[in-house]
Image (cartoon, rainbow, N blue to C red):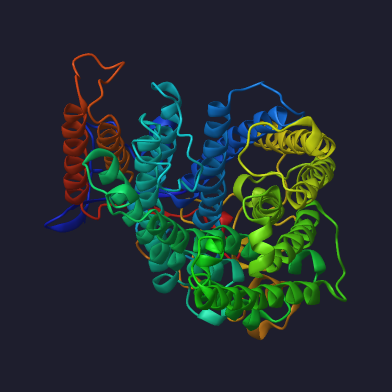
Amino acid sequence: MAESIVHDTHSSAKGGHAGAPQKSFFGLLKRPGEGCHPVIDWLTTVDHKKIAIMYGAAALFFLVLGGVEALIIRWQLAGPEREMISARFYNQLFTMHGTTMIFLAVMPLGAAFFNYIMPLQIGARDVAFPRLNAFSLWVFLLGGVLLNLSWFFPGGAPPVGWFAYAPLTSSTYSPGIGTDFWVLSLQVLGISSLAAAFNFIATIINMRAPGLSMMRLPVFTWMTLITSFLIILAFPAITIALVQLMFDRNFGTFFFEAGEGGRPILWQHLFWIFGHPEVYILILPAMGIISEVLPVFARKPLFGYPIIVFSGAVIGVLGFAVWSHHMFTTGLGVIALSAFALLTMLIAIPTGVKIFNWIGTLWGGRIRFDTPMLFAIGFISMFMIGGFTGIMHASVPVDTQQHDTYFVVAHFHYVLIGGSIMALLAGIYYWFPKVSGKQLSERWGKISFWLVLAGFNLAFFPMHFLGMTGMPRRTHTYRADMGWTEWNVWSTVGAFILGLGMAIFVGQIIYTAWKGRRCKADPWDSRTLEWATTSPPQAYNFPRTPIVKTRDQVWADKYDSEEIHLEWGPEEEHGIHMPDRSWYPLFAGIGLFIFALGWVLFKEPVPFIPGFANFLHLQVVGFSLLMLSIYLWALEGPGGYHLHPDKSKDPYA
């Protein structure tokens, strides 16, 4: 029985009725089964799975871009007194590398997993607000474009670091518009993150399958929920700081201008009140992925599930209480230093609890060393090294010695690459069959893993020694008699090996998606609800509503007694209701992009666009398009269509 489609036409005022499909955007927009052009389908989709794929593809592109920037940095530092690039270009590179990796690569890769996996894990048809989800995608993409447009304007990209410390960001020290691009792009990206976070919270709280209580949620879904709350609570701080910086640069205020009574240290407080929770926004999704991968490949349930969940929540709370350990050298005073040192030591406890739980999961298991498991074990070992050096920085005297040296660079990359990216790679290898119906090569996956592991350690472990011997961060060259040459050579060699491993991984993704062979729907013999449907899932995710009875429900169906088998709700008489496609999230994102670009180009001519002499025209056009799109978005009404699933695809038909 083929899928059949029944369309509803809804107006915002009169509810809906069955009938001819509602036409949108001059008839260009059609529903599934109506011959919609693939490009239009992807541009207008509100399907959480397609949005997740676009999030992931864009994040991988930015990951490659940020990696290339890092390799140029390492090539410059491979020897003493090299002049491969200028000092200014070097400053621009490390600014763009850090900003790209954090805001355009690791965060959106986590969002890609949130979008694709979380609704499936809770048995939902989609997220709570599908069009808002599409809006967050397009705003993220256009925010990334806005940031990188700075390369093409006079003065080039910002040279201020991803942290943009005042007063270096003032018009006096950064007179071009590169810093304005940085400010506005982060504000745009913040809108994307906040929209997505509210959406994920509403979805998890309100759209769980019957029987799926909070303490039956997969750990990855729990980490999605905690991370979303962190985003909502942390982003207002940096938003305030960015608005103040924008006013300082463009409207003559003096929030961070010491000569006019401002407080440059205020920027550091606001930035790190956001910046330290941001570290956990990056690492908690990784912890959730590892908590899903380890039990499957150890062939035993997750050890200490309630403690893992509770420790994740504790990390989220304590993450807001330790920001000033980034500021131990700024003269905060003995009481503040003591308090933040103690809290920094304290936050290591819930992290250590998770590591012991993961080791307990492995202990006594029938371990299979497939590629996802290798990356998961790599995460644990590398993240522990980053954690140990983090505990060292809880000591004020140690932190004072190592502050702004390459020791801190090593620590941060062991957390971010050895931690977040290792786990994200584990998640990609694990869930790729679910997303595409195809399995990545185990042989090439293991080659990629060993290259990434070896290259990563060779690149970043020597930086501990460089830092201990005094090599400062953010310097584009060094003298030959400083004793840093040998370690920098090894670090550069390791960076290129790491780059080769990542290139193999990206190439494997592209090849398998294009020409890979189909695999079983559940090649790993997995345990959670996303594996109880087809791979890839249909538009409606599940043919019928699942009714959950236990935590590892799919394993219970396979191996436990019939009393806790998964049940399914009755077939819905009118079919499954699905939301319409929409152009308006895309147009609203474009309007916001144009409006932000107009602010960046304050008092500057607009190249490439004849007839636009100054920023005001762009602002008017962008704001008008944004408001019109939101208005028409509201007038679309609930809309939607009904699908009658193909019963042959229902595993419990």
The picture places residue 177, in percent across and down from the top left corner, at: 35, 30
**Which one is in front, 296 or 518?**
296
Q: Is residue 305 left or right of residue 574?
A: right
The reply to whether residue 456 is visible in this rendering is yes
Residue positioned most to the left: 13
Instruction: Give the side of residue 593 with respect to residue 103, left or right.
Output: left
Q: Splitting the image into 4 quarters, where does residue 239 fall?
A: bottom left
Vertical side of 37 occupied by 111: above or below = below
Look at the picture and state if 137 lies above or below 207: above
In the image as oriented, which residue stretches furthest toward the front?
A: 259
- Image quadrant holding the C terminus, namely bottom right
Most foreground residue, 263 or 623: 263
In the foreground, 586 or 273:
273
Percent across and percent down for residue 599 are: 26, 35
Q: Residue at x 34, y 51 (%)?
A: 258
Q: In the picture provided, is 642 more to the left or to the right than 80?
A: left
Counting every numbered tag in the picture gives 0
Quadrant location of residue 601? top left
Residue at (74, 43) in percent of width and height:
440
Q: Residue at x 71, y 44 (%)?
A: 471
Q: Please say whether residue 257 is visible from this viewpoint.
A: no
Residue at the bottom extreme of this rendering: 563
| Residue 131 in the image, given as x and y percentages of width and height | 33, 50
Q: Position of residue 372 (x, y in %)?
A: 75, 54
